[in-house]
Image (tube, rainbow, N blue to C red):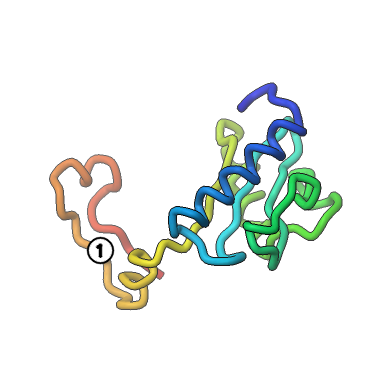
Amino acid sequence: MAGRGEAAARRDLVLHARLLQARGYVVGADGNLSVRVGEQVLITPSRVDYAALRPAGLALLDLDGNGRGNPSSEREVHLAVYRARPDVWAVVHAHPVYACVLAVNREPLPELLDEVGPVLGGEVRVA
């Protein structure tokens, strides 16, 4: 993603937002996506169904949150990731149905496979 132009990043972000929706990871305008473009961030707008999303409708912000457009209400989470991790080029916040169903139980997800422990550090806590 490094060195990519803004126009290409806009097209790709819309494409991936629509893919998330088509595959059932988000419904309507749930969740949000962003991508770093140099020292700026493109982020999906607040309350816009991904089926209606257009590249020109993405918000463009600097790392302090200043910019243009109607950025997602979760913009501060995305920006905090980019400020803390210069090596991160994209953030996806989705609402997969099965993950949401498990989360409402408010119990940690157990480490079901031995391979998960080293990667996730054990059970997955939910909020």
Q: Residue 11: x, y in percent?
A: 69, 38
Left or right: 98 in relation to 29: left
Quarter-of-image position of residue 24: bottom left
**Which residue in the structure is indicated by mark 1?**
109
Identify the secondary structure beneath mark 1. loop
Quarter of the rendering occupied by the N terminus: top right
Quarter-of-image position of residue 83: top right
Quarter of the rendering occupied by the C terminus: bottom left
Left or right: 41 in relation to 117: right
Q: Residue 91: x, y in percent?
A: 56, 46
What residue is at 60 percent from the left and 50 percent from the top? 33
What residue is at 86 percent from the left and 52 percent from the top? 68
* 23 up-or-down from 116: above or below: below
What residue is at 62 percent from the left and 51 percent from the top? 78
Report crowding for label 1: few under 14, some 14 to 19, many 20 or more residues within 10 A (C-alpha): some
Report how many numbered discs are placed on residues in the image: 1
Residue, far bottom: 105
Residue, far right: 68
Residue, far top: 3
Q: Residue 80: x, y in percent?
A: 63, 50
What residue is at 73 percent from the left and 30 percent from the top? 38
* 55 up-or-down from 124: above or below: above
* 3 up-or-down from 115: above or below: above
Q: Residue 25: x, y in percent?
A: 45, 58
Quarter-of-image position of residue 118: top left
Q: What residue type is labelled 1?
A: Leu
Left or right: 105 in relation to 96: left
Q: Please name whichever residue, 30 or 64, is drawn nearer the observer in this view of the structure.
A: 30
